[in-house]
Image (cartoon, helix red, strand yellow):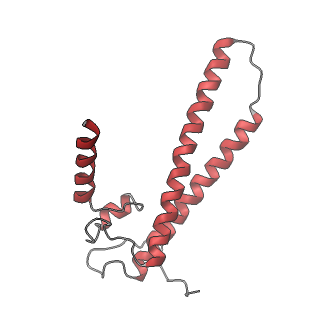
Amino acid sequence: MKPETFLPDNYKPAEDEPFMNERQLEYFRRKLLAWKEEILADSKETLNDLANSNRNLPDMADRASEETDRALELRTRDRQRKLVSKIDGALRRIENGEFGYCEMTGEPISLKRLDARPIATMTLEAQERHERSERVHRDD
């Protein structure tokens, strides 16, 4: 196991330092782990709420409203489950030394983009090309 990299509390990756150096990788690793922890805590809370909300509401409108809320919450949790999978993928890329580089072009992904979306796997340009291509094929 490698030693933990020192990271000041106010550290932000900067363009003037070597791309994906140890500090940047540690910054993104911690950011991803905190995000994952937050999602898992929210999921636990949702499961507890669902387990404790087995009320038998006599009013049909109230019951329908509660069922709609529950379905929406479950869809949200499903999206977050998929997000946890993407976070795990980003953490693996950090370990493998592939994090921060576009899977299509091999070019560095901008630090701004990674800070906003640390699970990004493509540069903004490659992502836009990919989405345009998907739209064209979807219309076929």
- Residue at 62% x, 48% y: name it: 42
Q: Position of residue 33 (x, y in %)?
A: 54, 65
Q: Nearer the viewer, residue 12 or 136?
A: 136
Counting labels gives 0
Q: Position of residue 52 (x, y in %)?
A: 77, 35
87 relative position to 136: left or right:
right
Q: Position of residue 41 (x, y in %)?
A: 64, 53
- The correct choice, above or below, for 65 with respect to 72 in the image is above
Q: Nearer the viewer, residue 50 or 97?
A: 97
Picture quadrant where residue 115 is located: bottom left
- The correct choice, above or below, for 118 with respect to 44 in the image is below
Picture quadrant where residue 76 is located: top right
94 relative position to 133: left or right:
right
On-image quarter of the C terminus: top left
Picture quadrant where residue 55 is located: top right
- Residue at 63% x, 48% y: name it: 43
Task: Work out whether residue 38 can be spotted.
Answer: yes
Task: Work out whether residue 8 can be spotted.
Answer: no
Q: Nearer the viewer, residue 6 or 119?
A: 119
- Residue at 37% x, 60% y: name it: 120
100 relative position to 75: left or right:
left
Extreme residue in the front direction: 140
Q: Position of residue 32 (x, y in %)?
A: 49, 64
